[in-house]
Image: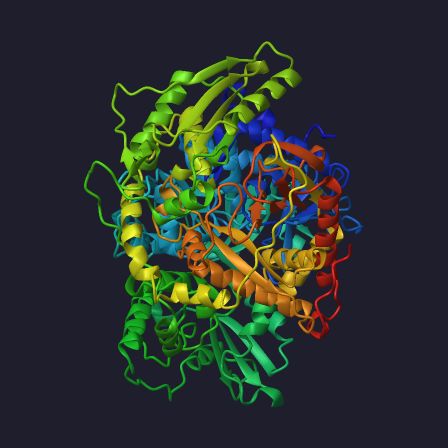
Amino acid sequence: MTPPDCFRLDRCVQPAQWMRTCVECDGRTLSYGELIALVDARARELAFLVRDGDVVAIRCEKSERYVVDLLAVLALGAVAMPIDPRLPEARVQTMMDTVPPQAVITDDGQRATGRPSAIPGHPNHGERPGYVMFTSGSTGQPKAILGSVSALVHFVRWQGAEFGVSASDRVSFLTPVGFDVSLRDIFLPLLHGGVLVIPSDRHLATPRATAHWLAGERVTVVHAVPSVAKLWARAMGDAVPPLRLVFLAGEKLYPATVAELRAAFAGTTEYVNLYGPSETTLAKFFFRVGRVDAGDPEPIPVGRPLPGTSFGFGGAGPGREVVITTRHATLGYINAPAAENARFARNGDGTVSYRTGDLGEVSAAGDLVIVGRADDEVKINGVRVHPNEVTQALQGYPGAQDICVFATTPHGGSEPRLAAVWIAGPAGQALPHNAPRDHALRHLPQAIVPTIWRKVAQFPRNANGKIDRARLVDLLVPADEGREAAATDTEAWVCRTVGAILACEVPCATADLFGLGATSIHVAFLIGKIEDEWGKSLAFADVFALASLAEIAALIERSPARAHVAIPDLSRAETYVLSPQQRRWWNIYMPEGNRSWATMVRVLKFDHAVDARRLERGLLDLSRHQDSMRLSFVPCNGGVVLKETPVMDATSLDIEVQDLSDQPAETAARLLNALRLDLANAEIPTDTWPLFRASVANLPGGRSAVVFAMHHMIGDGFSMNLVETQLRSFLEAGRAIPVPSRFNYLAYADWAAREEPMRFGPGSEAQAYWARVFATPYRKHVFAEKWTGPGHDRGQGYCVQVPDATRAAVKAYARAHRVTEFSLYLSAKFQALHRLLDQPDLVIGTPAAGREIQGTEELVGNFISLVCVRSHRDAGQSALDHVRRTMQDVACAMTHQSYQYDRLVADLGLPFEQSRFPLTTIFISHLNFCGAGRSPPDPSEWGFSDLGFAVKFDKMSYVREHDGATSLLIQYRNNLFDRADIETFASAWIGALDAVVRTESPDQSAAVPEAVV
């Protein structure tokens, strides 16, 4: 299956490294062994679709799964073509027409295209092609560069050896997947035993968020564009990341930038200037930046060539074209005009010379300095752009008669911008200056969309009739643009802030943000400043769509303030009050005493033996730092209060060890599951610390498992994930258990209990909302018991996969109608139950995470809330209207989740029941199992199963989103349904879902479709 010369990570990793962490993403980790296993499994899965030499487009979000897909494609000898999923469809189609892929991988699955490959006919000169990356083209089309596996590995091996990259380094994956620098991000740590650290979208939302993420993740190595790194430095505040190496590339590096970075980051950080077009493979020159004079206006050299690389100049005089000669170049352009591929010259000695188009000269010290370009190509935030490509893409804008795109540097700064000057056609006379921007965003990557727009009556021309570029620049600022004073304090603040961000004179409120030279990076920085100053979180798309600074100020004024909560410290006491969530959980789940359904169990599997004493140390450290894990519950004045048990040096835990290592694998698995069920069925006493349990099982092959149980009163599902993540980090990597940085759970509980009557009590908006929802009486549907006796409340399960066609239709429908997939599944469940139960009025409950307050994401504790959604069957309501109403009701319920479920039950005069839920016994939840390490459901899961423990709900449904599949898991009480009942319900649910999403014109649908039974 694997060609001998393709790239395989397992050939590069020593056995001693297999247990080390190699990938981290948003709290999830993979060891080298786990990553290699996932890559092997993924390669086996793709082998039915992908052949040696095929081009595989990977159009996925940056994640562990993306890394797995990339490595699996390379392991099969195929050619990876990463495509940023955020690119507009028109741009993606152009790329796929240039290099037709034989398979496409997306976050939703993979498919064959049936298109022939362009790779077999492309000369590879004995090299194994490995990847395709696109860069801007002067002809109006993006150019596709074919990279080789050996050249990629050569550069990464050199970089690691030259700069001492090792297992102690943590390398960030910040580069978008469609750029070749992303390969540096990925392979540098993986080939040198380090850790690849992947941010989520929220960590990239603003420069401040990125800087704080770098610090929080203890990143030591980054690749960055100088202008972007400068924004991190300005935004990070006290969050200083422990950076050891900062590799800067993509645009000229100036001494002032380095001086600013050194003033902000750690004094031990080394800065390296890299240079080399993508055509020469990643980089071919490097310069270790020493002392600089911040006032020096000249760019910093790009230094000396890598081993095996030399350079010369073409042409005559100062500033001649740089020609790079190397044994490790790419394999040229795919499907490009002969004139473009003529830039590559093979020399007959195994080397390739590439004419870069960059103008350079050699400094007195012998270092190469890049001084300009031989053509009009420009770097915008590190992205190569040929203005002619942008001009060609905009020629299709119907409102323009003619258009010209060029690079300019506003305000005498050092960072170029793209400007578009256009002449309106008959249909565009009344349009604003930036009218073509939407067209550009639909056809071009955001990075190369012009940010300066100006509509003119005609282009200035010289004596030869050609456009006079020098005079064109003068048109960018109209002479009649006034200097009106800001009308409000908000406008004045926006003008001052934009001026500071762009390092220009304070603009007037009517100025266009992008006309001033702002880019998407500046927008992100502005959003961060707005969060800091105004406490408001604005969406990037909302700000990007506005034209003037006055409009941005108006958006700030009308946007709601972000909830900012200052939770005070709490003095030590004998007892403490329950949080509202704990009180709700006690009243709803245990009104007459403890039950086993309050026990949460998690099995943590390890590829090595776990020492029981080491596990004890980790759990005690968790208890020292997480006060909820020091709690017990004691009666007081007819109620319950919290009691804290200090964790001292002499404190110990009883960690049971079971040795299953000599058992056959199947027997060991059965005994491990029995251990899990024993814990799940045991009531953890609430009046005695600790309210958690742990045991170790030694398994065959040197492996082990930790079975961990926690009482729901001190935690929730998020808490279990947090405990698992921190325990794994402690046991596998030796990292200390972190201390919550803001407040602890007892402080939160005290604050929330005091705030509840003031914010959510009588007369509150939350109480009024729920009073409206239940303004008409509701009669709970009660499922009749079929039998009584021991085991009547034992849980059963039924798992079924949503048909692929229905799943795809759900996703398409959700995108087309701007509704959530969850609202579609919930709406369909309502319709199925309306039909099956003959109930026109139904309530379904769903959990809410309850962690909106910043800082709660660091805590173990019970934060979860429970909310209700009510549905009335209306024969005149369209399917789409019901979905939208359901989505709106879910959003409103989540908004008012802090009005706890037990308060609502009491308001409605319902009793708290020990064995059944009040108000509703039907629930739904959405679980996301996507990402590396979270594989699709095993076919053995399909069908019925015995949960092995008691449940309180009547019918609980989980919509489980997997990589490439969606499953419905229905759990229910043993004595309420037989298997035929559950199969009928599952069929009705999927039938109702299918009927909604396959409606050709859902807006015209006369009524909600009846479920198919």
| Quadrant in which the C terminus appears | bottom right
Quadrant of residue 558 within the rendered picture? bottom left
Nearer to me, 221 or 497: 497
Q: Nearer the viewer, residue 658 or 126?
A: 658
The residue positioned 35% from the left and 62% from the top of the image is: 562
Q: Is residue 738 left or right of residue 908?
A: left
- Residue 175 versus residue 188 in the image, above or below: below
| Residue 981 horizontal side relative to residue 258, left or right | right
> Height in image: 616 above or below 181?
above
Q: Position of residue 485 (x, y in %)?
A: 28, 83
Quadrant of residue 466 within the rendered picture: bottom right
Q: Position of residue 230 (x, y in %)?
A: 34, 54
Q: Nearer the viewer, residue 293 or 688?
A: 688
Is 671 rendered above or below residue 735?
above
Residue 528 seen: yes
In the rendered view of the protein, which quadrant contains the N terminus? top right
- Give the number of callouts: 0
